[in-house]
Image (spheres, rainbow, N blue to C red):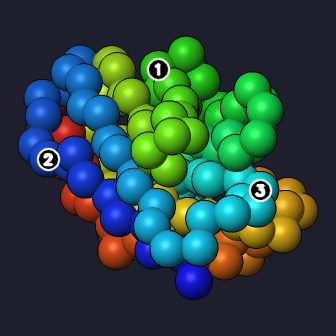
Amino acid sequence: QVQPVESGGGLVQAGGSLRLSCAASGRTGNLRFMGWFRLAPGKEREFVAALRWSGPSTYYADSAKGRFTISKDNAKNTVYLQMNSLKTEDTAVYYCAVSRGGGDYRYDYEYDYWGQGTQVTVSS
């Protein structure tokens, strides 16, 4: 079992920044991907960003490219999501997810463990 725990959400004005953190505990060996998804009211959960736990590859949804940066600290088993130039449409609950098996990082069903989520609210 792996337990991801998110932190860092909050209320910010449009144009502002937030950094989310996800610390993974438990059996963290052989992880394939760690990713961020979000769920906004009235919408389906959507992919935001992901990275390979071993290696430098990072992946972004089109909505996140150029504004968000995903990074990791392997020693701390922690993934970060730096969000800049936030927009009101970024308002959502953000979830950290961990995948052991790989597959397509864009799809939530490829992930095995999920955090409880952290609320991000961007005001106009």
Please tell me which residue is depicted at 19% across the width and 39% down the height of the picture.
122
Residue furthest bottom as drawn: 1
Which residue corresponds to mark 2?
Answer: 10
Where residue 66 sits, quadrant-wise, is top right
Q: Nearer the viewer, residue 109 or 79?
A: 79
User: Left or right: where does residue 115 sit relative to residue 1?
Assistant: left
Q: Nearer the viewer, mark 3 or mark 1?
A: 3
Quadrant of the frame with the N terminus? bottom right
Element marked by disc 2: strand
Which residue corresponds to mark 1?
Answer: 67
Which residue corresponds to mark 3?
Answer: 32
Q: Amino acid at mark 3?
A: Arg
Q: Amino acid at mark 1?
A: Arg
x and y, in percent, of residue 94 in the image: 38, 57
Q: Nearer the viewer, residue 115 or 60?
A: 115
Vertically, is 32 above or below 15? below
User: Left or right: where does residue 53 sit relative to residue 88?
Assistant: right
Element marked by disc 1: loop
Element marked by disc 3: loop
Q: Nearer the viewer, residue 44 or 110?
A: 110
Q: Nearer the viewer, mark 3 or mark 2?
A: 3
Other residues around mark 1 within 10 Å, as few (<14) / some (14–19) / many (≥20): some
Mark 1 to mark 2: distance in Å? Answer: 17 Å
Q: Are marks 3 and 1 in contact (CB under 8 Å)?
A: no
